[in-house]
Image (spheres, rainbow, N blue to C red):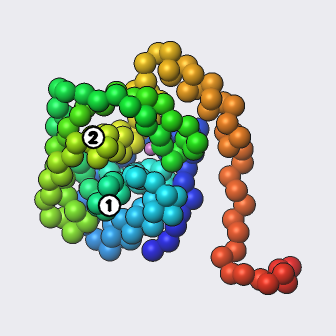
Amino acid sequence: MSVQPIRLFGDPVLITKADPVVDFDAELRRLVADLTDTMQAAPGSGLAAPQIGVGLRVFTYFVEGELGHLVNPELSLSTEDQFGPEGCLSIPGLTFDCRRALNVIAKGFNMYGEPVVIEGSDLLARCIQHETDHLDGVLFVDRLDTETRKAAMRAIREAEWFGAPPPLKVSPHPTNGFGL
Ligand code: NI
């Protein structure tokens, strides 16, 4: 279980469709643990596997105190919608108003391969749609209306993190000033 680096806008993994999970094994459980740890450290309300460089259909969420995960999600969306601010850990520091379905029913599996159904409204529904989009290589900026998307792309190009090289890997062991 460990916190992983979060991939940022511009990384090809974020625009690549993820593969369905076939093996519900120890590796999948480690992936769910890594996603959970990385999401909570950020902190964030949701995180999808491609955001830590893993092309599998898995995401975690932490919304209104409810922590969960879903594997191979299939969504049914309400026709009633919501419009409000949305952000993404892969597009740090920026939020834009985004239209989403108000309610969602998500069918899928837990990390043990047992079928689960998650019903969400408002923020949880927004989160589930956002994370499932990640599994299809879709980012929330792609869901914005034309004018807002232009503003978002401009803000991304001007962001400090955009196009910067990934941070150097830092040793997790403290060296007490004696690092050589
Ligand atoms: Ni995101």
Q: Where is residue 120 in the image (x, y as percent from the top left)?
A: 21, 46
Q: Distance between the residues labelled 1 and 2?
A: 14 Å
Report the residue at 55% width, 19% height from top: 150
- The quarter of the picture where residue 32 lies is bottom left
Q: Which amino acid does label 1 sit on?
A: Gly
* 59 relative to 29, above or below: above
* 89 relative to 171, above or below: above
* 50 relative to 24, above or below: above
Q: From the viewer's perspective, is 139 left or right of 74?
A: right
Tag 2 residue: 122
The quarter in which the N terminus is drawn is bottom left
Q: How crowded is mark 1: few (under 14 residues within 10 Å), some or many (20 or more)?
A: few
Q: Residues within 10 Å of mark 2 (few under 14, many from 20)?
A: some
Tag 1 residue: 65
Q: Which amino acid does label 2 sit on?
A: Asp
For ligand 1, which image quadrant applies? top left
Report the residue at 72% width, 48% height from top: 165
SS category of the residue bearing label 2: helix
**Marks 1,2: beta carbons within 8 A:** no
Q: Position of residue 111 (x, y in %)?
A: 25, 66
Sequence order check: which comes first, mark 1 or mark 2? 1
Q: Nearer the viewer, residue 44 or 112?
A: 44
SS category of the residue bearing label 1: loop
- The quarter of the picture where residue 26 lies is bottom left
Q: Where is residue 180 in the image (x, y as percent from the top left)?
A: 86, 79
Report the residue at 23% width, 34% height from top: 102
Q: Where is residue 142 in the image (x, y as percent from the top left)?
A: 44, 27
Is residue 72 something that shows in the picture?
Answer: yes
Is residue 17 something that shows in the picture?
Answer: no
- The quarter of the picture where residue 171 lies is bottom right
Report the residue at 17% width, 26% height from top: 79
Q: From the viewer's perspective, is 163 left or right of 140?
A: right
